[in-house]
Amino acid sequence: MLSALRSKLALPMLASTLYSTHVLPRCPPGRFLDLKRTSHKKLSSYLAHLQNEGLLVVRESSPGVQSIVSVQREHPRLRTGCKLALPEPAPDSQEEAGYTFPQVRELRTVTAAVKPLFPKCSKGDALAPEDVRAVLRNYVKENELQDPTDKRMVQMDPTLSDVAGTSELRLSWEELGSRVMSRMQFAHEVRLPGREPVVHRGALAPIAITVAQRTGNKKVTLVEGLETYGIDPQRLAHEVQVGVAASTSLTPVSRGGNKQVLQLLVQGNQVVFLERLLTGPSYGVPRRLLKGLENAPTKKKQKAHK
């Protein structure tokens, strides 16, 4: 705060503007400023403290709305100490920011149920869905199982019947492919720029954005799953803290046995801002990989808070 007061400010200035535009941006990346964890608890209380010390003058323009009308730059506390400069603005493009959204694709792993169809594969090998369909097409072609009277249908032999788990004599190509896929397990591959692709068991999990209600009817926004896509939770937390002038925190949480992920907590319902930030040029996350966007406040609720 003192560093912000030492800078050139266009007064009068709303206290909220001072905090969001001049105080929060000076917080170093990886560090979090939360007034609620200080002895003052609120910005208004801290400003009252500074006014009592003679550093500034605060006026209430309307109930609950405070403005800084003057700063006593000759005050000893403002004349001494270093002046902390604003950090350089974060680059807009993915290339400049050093982050590019990874290539991700869904896979299926070979199980005992479908192994007869994949003699060259071992149990647990991961294949792309298009590769599974290619193996299926080749098997049908080599064994002349396509129905000559209806090219959309495949005649079942004992191997296909076992793999598809059916006693039907014929299946459509679509139904056959769907049945084979359903008897395989999900996996996914993530290829981060400059790194070897990594295959993970299980379905590709989207970034989860939820809104929870805490003590005092206050809402918080929780974000999980950033690490899957190589997103730095600390960097995102800092960008959100500055962007919406709300306190943030990171907490390790256990997911799926011994797996731990960092959960980002932001004060208030910040779903709209997070969607705009994550799908924007800095991160480029496809909307289909964001879960919980329906938790954004409705227009009626947004107007009620204004």
Image (cartoon, rainbow, N blue to C red):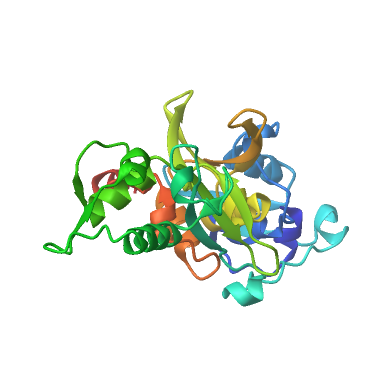
Q: Dividing the picture into quarters, in which one does residue 144 lie?
A: bottom left
Residue 197 in the image, given as x and y percentages of width and height: 64, 60
Residue 33 in the image, given as x and y percentages of width and height: 68, 45
Q: Residue furthest left?
A: 149
On screen, 61 above or below 22?
above
On screen, 270 above or below 25?
above
126 or 171: nearer the viewer: 171
On screen, 119 above or below 278?
above
- Numbered label tally: 0
Is 39 on the left or on the right of 186, as rendered?
right
168 or 213: nearer the viewer: 168
Is 50 on the left or on the right of 12, as rendered?
right
Q: Dividing the picture into quarters, in which one does residue 210 lie?
A: top left
Q: Is any part of residue 19 visible from this angle?
A: no
140 or 135: nearer the viewer: 140
Q: Residue furthest top?
A: 215
Q: Dividing the picture into quarters, in which one does residue 12 lie?
A: bottom right
On screen, 160 above or below 212?
below
Q: Residue at x 25, y 56 (%)?
A: 173
Q: Residue at x 65, y 68 (%)?
A: 193
Q: Residue at x 55, y 54 (%)?
A: 120
Residue 6 in the image, given as x and y percentages of width and height: 75, 63
Q: Is any part of residue 228 visible from this angle?
A: yes
Q: Residue at x 44, y 54 (%)?
A: 289
Residue 36 in the image, given as x and y percentages of width and height: 62, 34
Is 278 on the left or on the right of 98, as rendered?
left
